[in-house]
Amino acid sequence: MQQIVDFILELDKLKGVARKVRPLGLDRYENSAEHSWQIALLAASLAPHAGPAIDINRVTAMLLVHDIGEIDTGDTMVFVEHGWEERKAAELAAVKRIFGMLPEQQRTTFQALWQEFEDGDTSEARFAHAADRAMPILLNLANEGQSWRENGISHERVIGRVGPPIKAGCPALWDYLEVRLEEARQKGWFGA
């Protein structure tokens, strides 16, 4: 029991990992714990648009563990274009440390879910990636491009970085977002 309690208290640190987009109506940036919770609910809500073979419980579990490595590494904005190999190696070391706090069965289960998300080879992982990539877009659209403008993120960069994984994981979601992203471009909500 103590291992589980120690693990859960370690996860509390995820609440202190700031991201680059603001929650609606707030002046602060969201944290990674809020992000993970919200995309898990986004995926569950999008379940009718997933393929029939998708195990939504597995997707939800993946989304709840996918950013745990950020406790040690911090968050990197999805639109960053370089340094991903080093970043992923650091995240792997972090999740091994953090999941290593758990008894063997839970450690193995959670690390396998994290790795499945990272590999992106299963239909569940692709659907999870779609939800993960969509949430910053949804918040930016609701905030008139707040983090895109603040960080100089262009329309082309957004489309290039998040379009393929969203389209691969949930085509109906991409169809919806593509139209809204074009509307945002026309409104000038992107950086240079």
Image (cartoon, rainbow, N blue to C red):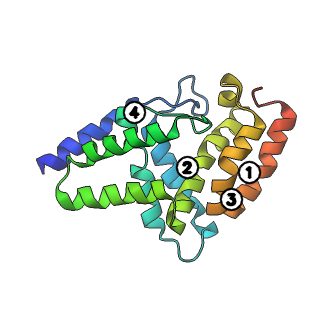
Amino acid on which the number 1 mark rests in the picture: Leu
The quarter of the picture where the C terminus appears is top right
Q: Position of residue 60 (x, y in %)?
A: 45, 59
Q: Residues within 10 Å of mark 3 (few under 14, many from 20)?
A: some
User: Label 3 to label 2, Cα distance in Å?
Assistant: 12 Å
Horizontal arrangement in the rendering, residue 109 relative to residue 185 (left or right): left
Tell whether label 1 touches label 3 (CB within 8 Å). no
Write down the residue under mark 2. Answer: 132
Residue 177: mark:
1
User: Label 3 to label 4, Cα distance in Å?
Assistant: 28 Å
Tell whether label 2 touches label 4 (CB within 8 Å). no
**In the figure, residue 46 lies in which quadrant?**
bottom right
Name which of mark 3 and mark 2 comes first in the sequence. 2
Amino acid on which the number 2 mark rests in the picture: Asp
Total label count? 4
Q: Position of residue 132 (x, y in %)?
A: 55, 49
Secondary structure at numbered mark 4: helix
Q: Position of residue 155 (x, y in %)?
A: 77, 37
Q: What residue sits 56% from the left and 61% below the top?
A: 127
User: In the image as oriented, which residue stretches furthest toward the bottom?
Assistant: 52
Horizontal arrangement in the rendering, residue 74 relative to residue 134 (left or right): left
User: In the image as oriented, which residue stretches furthest toward the right?
Assistant: 186
Name which of mark 3 and mark 1 comes first in the sequence. 3
Write down the residue under mark 3. Answer: 167
User: Label 2 to label 1, Cα distance in Å?
Assistant: 13 Å
